[in-house]
Amino acid sequence: MGPYSEQRQLERAQAVARLLSDPNLNDWARNYWSNVAANLSKSEEQYNSRVVGIYNELRNQYTKEWL
């Protein structure tokens, strides 16, 4: 995960919107991509918070047996 980029988030949102505009998308996929669109980070603070959460979870998952 790189640094927060508002431009990159806009590109992600546009890519998801293109997927959702497909009339042949099944219900499961439409629900999945709708959730992805709703959960895109709207600010650098939100993005950084998610990054920290993800890496803390990974660290805990792989180091719990060491302690």
Image: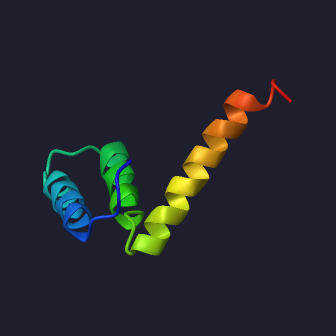
Residue 17 in picture, x, y percent from top left: 19, 61
The residue shown at (27%, 65%) is: 5
* Residue lying furthest right: 67
Establish if 22 lies above or below 10: above
Quarter occupied by residue 66: top right
Between 57 and 33, the residue placed more toward the observer is 57
The residue shown at (68%, 28%) is: 62
Residue 3 in picture, x, y percent from top left: 35, 58
* Residue lying furthest top: 65
The residue shown at (19%, 67%) is: 7
Relative side of 67 to 29, left or right: right
Between 4 and 9, the residue placed more toward the observer is 4
Relative side of 61 to 20, left or right: right
Relative side of 10 to 37, left or right: left
The quadrant the C terminus occupies is: top right
Establish if 37 lies above or below 67: below
The residue shown at (17%, 55%) is: 15
Report how many numbered discs are placed on residues in the image.
0
Residue 44 in picture, x, y percent from top left: 40, 72
What scheme was used to colour the molecule? rainbow
